[in-house]
């Protein structure tokens, strides 16, 4: 019950908050929760070690990378939501109801995945895209632990590594993009069309 | 053994970096790339014939892309100052891309296949944004975000598949749907195609050739494997219906958008969406004929489109526009190239499956695409070479790579008459019998 409430609140925070630090905190809560619920499935020493490595990458390295980027680029602090809070709150409620009736897909994981995808749509900052992808990874991990014994350790580590590399590639491209787009606004990604 | 073969292209590029004189490095690079391309021969009889077929496709086209890249001069490599805009980084990323694609086609589980597909995104994002120019960065960003979302959805599908059982049919259907949608994002099927025209048009020519010729084929290979597994689980009809929807959307939307393109690489990119849609339709039609047509079309398209992108790269490099004509002829399916034959096979599969609406949309899409390609070919044929183009000395290695790819397209077109048909038939029957 507590886990459900925490996931609901953290997922809602992804959609509702407009500041980078708040969304990073929500992501850390979700990723931490995903790691916590996966712990009982780690029976061997190797599995436990891989899970810990995965946790360090997800909970420390990725958020630190985003934090350093935001600190160096103050414009990235604002996620620039494109719609107001009432609409975003409505979206969160719709996501919660949709996840509740998702059928075969576990509801908590589905809710986080939907919130992450919603975040990609409603926030205009490029940093929001990176945070959305991180949250999507956390949602998939929560789904994994809801579905059964979770991901095989090698795939869990691979998925974590994937998310981490996506984060740093995204930050590197965002860094190069600042010259052309100082506000890091997704609106400026419309030159290539048709 | 399999692991060595998969990592060989990546390791080869790392070794190459240790050699300093540029000419020595070039020789070592091509020597090691040739070795890496030949290594999958050791797996003959140890992995499925389908995996071998795609492994040869991956290795052949990646080798040609490497050869083409060694022929391009340094000033063709963009103006960016980013760390990834360096030639050595380019080749390491190319080797990583090659290894990741081998992992996709040689893996025996969906989980490892997913890992390979996700690695291709990581390797190619910097390659798409290689020049460091504004438009390339925009294309790289869209590619990274959209494909990562697709990969995340596919992972959810793989997870659901791992837990699926006959007692929980809803979970099996959800797994199949999520995997198809996720991999279809990488295959550039409409409506998840938004990254493809930008990435293909802004990447360096050899990377566009690999994205269009091999990466799309690997993603469609993953979908083919999902369809085979769905057939075995008794959910083949659902998978085929989903592919019919995606294929119908892709062929129609791409056919229309091809008519309004003025940039040659963008036109080729939309052509890729159209052909991916045709393969999805062939898989959706199902049956031995449908899967046979899908495989034959995949091979024909991979080679013809790679040749077209490499030719477009030569034209951008300063060659006369008529250099594009052989590749355009291949893409239009003019004899002796095989795309028209594989398209007719897809039509025959549609007739056999009585899918008249999807068939009508597919034929309309094919006609629109044909008009757009012929119009561009005529424009290029009538264009006169400028004085600068006449004076341009084209890199021989790049010309040879382009010629090799188009020659391979000719060989594949003739394959059904020299025993290739029985191979493809047995592969198609193998997938059907998995049911």
Image (spheres, coloured by chain):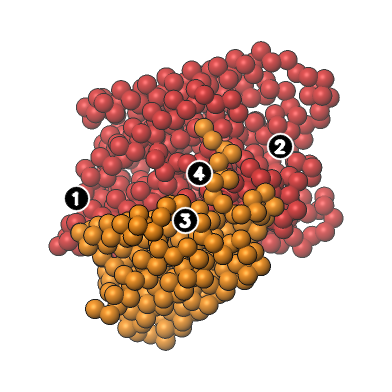
Q: Colour of chain B?
A: red
Callout 1: residue from which chain? B
Give yes or no for contact between labels 3 and 2 (Cβ–Cβ under 8 Å).
Answer: no
Q: Give the structural element (helix, strand or loop) at label 2.
A: helix
* Whether residue B80 is situated above or below residue A95 in the rendered picture: above
The secondary structure type at the circle numbered 4 is: helix
Q: CA distance from mark 1 to mark 2?
A: 48 Å
* Image-based side of B241 in relation to A192, left or right: left
Along the line of sight, the residue nearer the viewer: B14 or A22: A22
Q: Which residue is mark 1?
A: B234
Task: Please report the residue visible at 72 percent of the width from the left and 58 percent of the height from the top.
Answer: B83
Which callout, 4 or 3, points to the residue nearer the camera? 3
Question: In this figure, which residue is indicated by the disc labeled 3?
Answer: A81
Q: Chain letter for orange? A: A
Q: CA distance from mark 4 to mark 3?
A: 23 Å
Residue B65, horizontal then vertical, whole percent: 64, 43
The image shows residue B177, relative to residue B327, as above or below, that is below
**Marks 1 and 3 on same chain:** no
Q: Earlier in the sequence, mark 4 or mark 2?
A: 4
Chain at tag 4: B
In the image, farthest residue toward the top: B382
* Any part of residue B97 in sight: no
């Amino acid at each position: 019950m507590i886990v459900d409430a925490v996931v609901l609140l953290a997922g809602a925070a992804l959609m509702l908050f407009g500041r980078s630090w708040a969304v990073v905190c929500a992501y850390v809560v979700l990723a931490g929760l995903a790691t916590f619920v996966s712990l009982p499935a780690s029976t061997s020493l190797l599995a436990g070690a891989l899970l810990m490595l995965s946790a360090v990458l997800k909970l420390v390295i990725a958020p630190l990378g985003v934090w350093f980027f935001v600190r160096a680029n103050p414009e990235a602090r604002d996620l620039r939501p494109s719609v107001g809070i009432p609409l975003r709150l409505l979206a969160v409620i719709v996501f919660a109801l949709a996840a509740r009736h998702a059928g075969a897909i576990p509801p908590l994981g589905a809710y986080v995945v939907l919130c992450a995808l919603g975040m990609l749509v409603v926030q205009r900052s490029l940093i929001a895209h990176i945070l959305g992808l991180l949250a999507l990874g956390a949602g998939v991990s929560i789904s994994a632990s809801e579905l059964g014994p979770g991901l095989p350790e090698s795939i869990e580590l691979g998925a974590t590594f994937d998310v981490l590399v996506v984060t740093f590639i995204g930050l590197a491209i965002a860094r190069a993009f600042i010259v052309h787009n100082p506000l890091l606004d997704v609106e400026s990604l419309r030159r290539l069309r048709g | 053994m399999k692991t060595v073969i998969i990592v060989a292209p990546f390791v080869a590029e790392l070794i190459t970096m240790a050699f300093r004189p540029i000419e020595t490095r070039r020789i070592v690079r091509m020597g090691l790339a040739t070795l890496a391309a030949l290594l999958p021969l050791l797996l003959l009889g140890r992995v499925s014939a389908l995996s071998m077929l795609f492994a040869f496709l991956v290795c052949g086209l990646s080798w040609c892309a490497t050869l083409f890249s060694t022929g391009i001069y340094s000033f063709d490599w963009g103006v960016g100052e980013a760390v990834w805009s360096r030639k050595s980084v380019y080749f390491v990323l190319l080797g990583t891309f090659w290894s990741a694609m081998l992992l996709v086609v040689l893996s025996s589980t969906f989980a490892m296949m997913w890992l390979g597909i996700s690695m291709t995104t990581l390797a190619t994002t910097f390659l798409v944004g290689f020049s460091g120019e504004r438009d390339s960065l925009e294309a790289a960003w869209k590619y990274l975000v959209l494909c990562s979302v697709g990969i995340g959805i596919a992972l959810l599908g793989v997870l659901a598949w791992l837990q699926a059982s006959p007692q929980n049919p809803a979970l099996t259907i959800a797994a199949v749907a999520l995997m198809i949608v996720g991999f279809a994002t990488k295959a550039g099927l409409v409506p998840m195609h938004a990254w493809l025209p930008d990435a293909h048009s802004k990447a360096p020519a050899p990377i566009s050739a690999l994205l269009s010729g091999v990466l799309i084929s690997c993603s469609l290979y993953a979908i083919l494997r999902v369809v085979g597994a769905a057939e075995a689980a008794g959910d083949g009809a659902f998978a085929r219906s989903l592919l019919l929807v995606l294929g119908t959307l892709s062929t129609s939307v791409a056919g229309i958008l091809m008519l309004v393109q003025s940039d040659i690489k963008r036109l080729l990119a939309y052509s890729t969406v159209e052909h991916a849609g045709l393969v999805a339709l062939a898989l959706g039609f199902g049956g031995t004929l449908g899967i046979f047509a899908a495989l034959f079309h995949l091979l024909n398209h991979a080679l013809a489109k790679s040749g077209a992108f490499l030719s477009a790269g030569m034209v951008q490099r300063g060659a006369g526009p008529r250099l594009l004509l052989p590749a355009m002829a291949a893409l239009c399916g003019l004899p002796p190239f095989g795309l028209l034959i594989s398209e007719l096979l897809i039509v025959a599969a549609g007739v056999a499956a009585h899918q008249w609406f999807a068939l009508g949309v597919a034929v309309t899409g094919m006609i629109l695409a044909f008009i757009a390609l012929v119009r561009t070919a005529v424009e290029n044929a009538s264009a006169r070479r400028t004085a600068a183009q006449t004076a341009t000395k084209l890199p021989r290695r790049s010309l040879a790579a382009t010629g090799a790819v188009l020659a391979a397209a000719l060989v594949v077109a003739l394959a059904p008459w020299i025993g290739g048909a029985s191979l493809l038939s047995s592969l198609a029957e193998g997938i059907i019998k998995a049911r």
